[in-house]
Image (cartoon, rainbow, N blue to C red):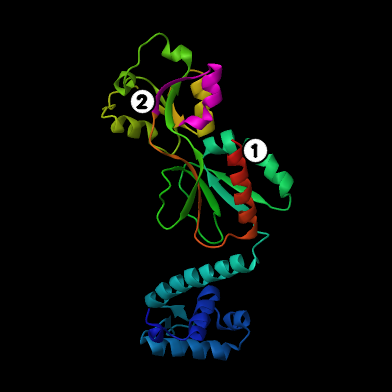
């Protein structure tokens, strides 16, 4: 980076404060300087860039298109800096710990164990987002994601929590006495699929089966998908760890198993975790070791 080409930080701060408040006086109050100092800094910034950032032709100043562009960038940059500083200094320790995971993992693995974490750390507030959608991990937002995959998420750190193959299951009454030898034998069956995923289509595609003429599928949250599978409403694909007890008890039959090395991973941003996250990660590892 060419640091010498960047405008003075004081000028950028003054302009960002004005862009946030759209008032010279309010910007001065935010930075504890006079409104005249704000105006001077903004003119100096325009001179440094050789651009008009403010339209002063009307009764009230307004940002030019170039000014709007710079304002958005500064808001994101200064916001990220502020959140990172809070995380490093512990100033955001009271902010709830935000956890992203799938509804199935939340219902079948996390929630039955979470009382243990609450007993150890009653002072930590939690926010759990059960969604199949992959959420971005950003400062001030999601602290940790529990994701299924092979452990490769560019720019993020991951650690295997629970190893589990993908399995195809169905209620015994749905299978009956049929001989199911290949995925093609299930092409025309009704399938249950976790909302927000394409697991059914992907599974058939991996096995070279065209299912366009099949009997469709029902998409619903993962925990409801498993209830529907137990009730014999369709065939389902899920992580094997969620149905081990169902298979042992005879509530579900395992028809196929994907032997690729996958599982649920702890996924975090690089860097030192803030105290609530550090406590949660330690607890997760202990729970995984038990099972």
Q: Position of residue 96 (x, y in %)?
A: 64, 54
Left or right of 2? Residue 129 is right
Give the class, few, some or many, for how many residues have Cα within 10 Å of label 2's Cα (few <14, many ≥20): some
Residue displayed at 53% across by 18% down: 251
Label 2 residue SS: loop
Q: Is residue 279 above or below residue 259?
A: below
Left or right of 96? Residue 132 is left
Q: Which residue is mark 1?
A: 113
Q: Which residue is mark 2?
A: 216
Q: Is residue 283 above or below residue 190?
A: below
- In which image quadrant can residue 196 be found? top left
Q: Position of residue 164 (x, y in %)?
A: 47, 35
Q: Give the camera-side residue of 7 and 111.
A: 111
Residue 96 in view of the camera = no
Q: Position of residue 133 (x, y in %)?
A: 46, 44
Left or right of 79? Residue 196 is left
Q: Which residues are magenta?
A: 239-257
Picture quarter with the N terminus = bottom left
Magenta-span inclusion, residue 10: no
């Amino acid at each position: 980076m060419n640091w010498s080409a960047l405008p003075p930080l004081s000028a950028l701060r003054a302009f960002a404060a004005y862009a946030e408040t759209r008032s010279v006086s309010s910007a001065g109050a935010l930075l504890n300087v006079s409104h005249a100092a704000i105006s001077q800094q903004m003119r100096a910034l325009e001179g440094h860039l050789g651009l008009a950032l403010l339209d002063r032709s009307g009764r009230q100043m307004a940002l030019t298109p170039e000014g709007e562009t710079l304002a958005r960038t500064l808001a994101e940059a200064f916001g990220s800096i502020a959140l990172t500083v809070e995380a490093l200094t512990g100033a955001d320790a009271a902010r709830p710990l935000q956890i992203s995971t799938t509804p199935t993992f939340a219902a079948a693995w996390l929630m039955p164990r979470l009382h243990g974490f609450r007993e150890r750390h009653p002072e930590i507030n939690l926010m759990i987002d059960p969604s199949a959608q992959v959420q971005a991990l950003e400062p001030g937002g999601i602290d940790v994601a529990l994701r299924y995959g092979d452990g490769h998420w560019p720019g993020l750190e991951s650690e295997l929590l629970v190893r589990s193959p993908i399995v195809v299951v169905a209620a015994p009454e749905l299978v009956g006495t049929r001989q199911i030898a290949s995925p093609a034998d299930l092409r025309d069956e009704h399938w249950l699929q976790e909302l927000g995923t394409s697991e059914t289509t992907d599974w058939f595609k991996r096995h070279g089966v065209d299912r366009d003429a099949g009997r469709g599928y029902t998409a619903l949250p993962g925990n409801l998908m498993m209830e529907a599978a137990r009730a014999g409403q369709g065939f389902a694909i899920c992580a094997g760890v969620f149905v081990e007890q169902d298979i042992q008890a005879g509530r579900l039959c395992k028809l196929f198993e994907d032997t690729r090395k996958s599982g649920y991973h702890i996924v975090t941003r690089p860097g030192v975790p803030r105290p609530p996250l550090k406590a949660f990660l330690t607890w997760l590892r202990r729970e995984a070791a038990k099972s």
